[in-house]
Image: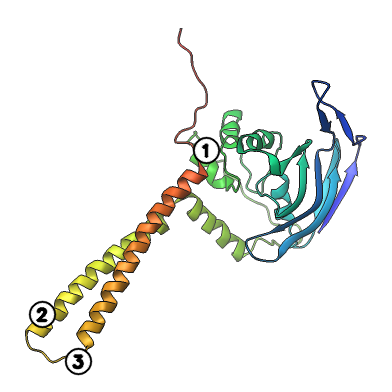
Amino acid sequence: MRLGAATGYRGSGGMANGPTGTALVETRVVRFENVGLRYGLGPEVLRDLTFRIEPHSFQFLTGPSGAGKTSLLRLMFLSLRPTRGLITQFGHDVASLSRDALATLRRRIGIVFQDFRLLDREALEAVRRLPERTRLYRGLTPWIGLRQCVIPYVAQERAAGRSQYGLGQRVAVFARGVFDFSSGPLYAGLLLGGLAVGLSTLYLLFILAWILMGEWTAPGWASAISVTLLLSSVSLAFSGIIGVYVARIYDEVRARPPYVSLRVRKHE
């Protein structure tokens, strides 16, 4: 992965007086110092990144698929927090900012994704106000509930090269769309658990009737199968109940607003 710059004008860098004349604000737009990033307990996907982006400069980022370009961009537009190191944007230490301060700072960053959408100012501000850090914009833009339309077009064939947007990335986007906007998989566990308890109960009644009719069974078979079915179905049912609570906790932590207010009208 390679970060380059084509600069028409560079600022002098360093520190400058703030609006009040007392606070010091760094004039660099972005500064990375020994930044590292890993997902979960896996290896670092970004290691010891150190660079600075000056005002009025043009940057370009190149590299093969899997080099970490998307992860770096997500760090820059505050969708991820680094595992280690220092990131400052517009003179602010990103790690020390509150959620509200991050949302305010994020409004100064403009992003154009591959999934192109034309948003008016109201829709843009509604999406910006959402407190989430990991965002699937193709799901959030319909979620805010504003009117939308589709503009059909025919994509031309590629003039050169091959698309690197493979099956794995498509599956990942589909999974994010399901898990970010639906608690269905967790509630499915509760449904399957209840179904398992019902079927297990019916089968236990069948075993009891089989024994009462005097039919032959292997010694210990009825007790073994009864305990196995009962414990397994009850365990699955309680896993589904835990999943329902996890879904509610996830909704609270995600903190999506129950409704989006676009404007306030005052009646005199």
Foreground pick, 211 / 24 = 24
Q: How far is the residue under mark 3 from the one under mark 2?
A: 16 Å
Name the secondary structure under disc 3: loop
Point out the tag, 3 or 2, that comes first from the N-terminus.
2
- Whole-percent x and y of residue 79? 65, 47
Q: Which residue is mark 3?
A: 219
Q: Is residue 45 left or right of residue 140?
A: right
Nearer the observer: mark 1 or 3; the answer is: 3
Q: Which residue is mark 1?
A: 149
Point out the tag, 1 or 3, that comes first from the N-terminus.
1
Point out the tag, 1 or 2, that comes first from the N-terminus.
1
Whether residue 18 is visible here, answered yes or no, is: yes
Q: How far is the residue under mark 1 from the one under mark 3?
A: 68 Å
Vertical relation: 125 (above or below) 160: above
- Whole-percent x and y of residue 40? 62, 61
Where residue 95 sits, quadrant-wise, is top right
Give the residue drawn at x 38%, y 54%: 244
Q: Alpha-carbon neighbours of circle 3 within 10 Å: few (<14), some, or many (≥20)?
A: few
Q: Alpha-carbon neighbours of circle 1 within 10 Å: few (<14), some, or many (≥20)?
A: few
Colouring scheme applied when the structure was drawn: rainbow
- Whole-percent x and y of residue 160? 77, 60
Nearer the observer: mark 1 or 2; the answer is: 2
Q: Which residue is mark 2?
A: 209
Whether residue 183 is visible here, answered yes or no, is: no
Q: Residue furthest left?
A: 213
Name the secondary structure under disc 1: loop
